[in-house]
Image (spheres, rainbow, N blue to C red):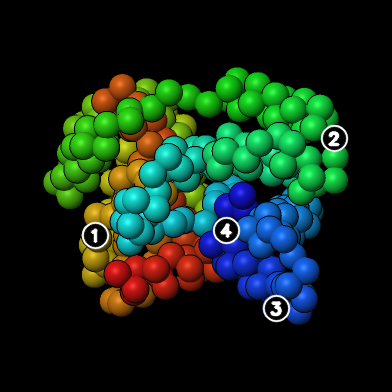
Amino acid sequence: MLGSVTEAEDVVQDAFVRWSEMDQSQIRDPAAWLTTAVTRLSLDRLKSARRRRETYVGPWLPEPLATDTVDPADLAGTADSLTFAFLVILESLSPLERAVFVLHDVFGHPHAQIAQMLGRGPAAIRQVAARARRHLEQRQHRYDADSRRQREVTEAFLAACAGEDVEAMIGLLAPDVTFTGDGGGVVAATPRPVRGAGRVAKMLAGFWATGQRRGLSVEAAEINAEPGIVVRDGEDIESVFVFEVRDHRITAVRGVRNPEKLAGFARLRRGR
């Protein structure tokens, strides 16, 4: 819903505080009450987040989520909605469209129930859901659902990076691959997306060589249900990179370096 672990935790905490202040004996359906509270608080957050992003420095990416620290049963049916590609597309929806889509298409709440949560008519909610779905379908790309294949392509690419084999790297990247880096103006990052296999390969080869000179370590990880790597400076997480794979090629690489966005990710990794 929010694209931020930290903000999601804050919303849940706010909802819990409101719940604890209620006369719970008067609430007939606690689950519905809590879902409504979290949804409305999330909408408020989405509206303020949209205003903040107007002044965000450089490209914006969602907070990474360490999905390899989560019980696979808890991700059943929702993994596709956690990918960076999907979360970035969600940003193009209005807060209302996003809330309705997530509640209905991801979590399966009926339109009538969502209408009650948001204080709108069921017909209006159905229209919002249909509009959001059309919008996403126009922008969503097909990707390799086979996680084993995704890992194989990513591992081959990382081996090519380690061997400084730029030609092999280019061969594993889609011709129109895009690299996006998010430093939030706090740390250095590419100020705009970099496109093209040759440019992206040379840039990532440079990143890898610089990391080796600095003594940074790299570990494989599943991030937002996609293959990725965690780059550490000692015990501290310096950055994470996520790879989107389609048709046996890497079509997008997304790197998050903003320390504020890595805090929640680091907390989950420590709790493994």
Q: Which residue is mark 2?
A: 121
Q: Residues within 10 Å of mark 4 (few under 14, many from 20)?
A: some
Q: Secondary structure at mark 3?
A: helix
* Residue type, label 2: Gly
**Element type at marker 2?**
loop
The structure residue drawn at horizontal position 43% and vertical position 65%, both measured from the top left corner, is: 265
Circle 3 Cα neighbour tier, 10 Å, few/some/many (<14 / 14–19 / ≥20) = few
**Residue 27 is drawn in which quadrant?**
bottom right
Q: Residues within 10 Å of mark 1 (few under 14, many from 20)?
A: few
- For label 4, the residue is 4
The circle on residue 219 is: 1
What amino acid is found at the position of numbered circle 3 in the picture?
A: Ser
- Disc 3 versus disc 4: distance between alpha carbons? 24 Å
Q: Secondary structure at mark 4?
A: loop
Residue 134 appears at what percent x and percent y? 65, 21
N-term-proximal mark, 4 vs 1: 4
Which of the two labelled residues, at mark 4 and mark 2, occupies the earlier sequence position? Answer: 4
Quadrant of the image containing the C terminus: bottom left
Residue identified by numbered label 3: 20
Residue 207, above or below 144: below
Indicate whether 191 appears above or below 137: below
Residue 51 appears in the picture as rendered: yes
Which is closer to the viewer, label 3 or label 1?
3
The location of residue 10, given as percent across then percent down, is: 64, 70
Is label 3 in contact with label 1 (beta carbons under 8 Å)?
no
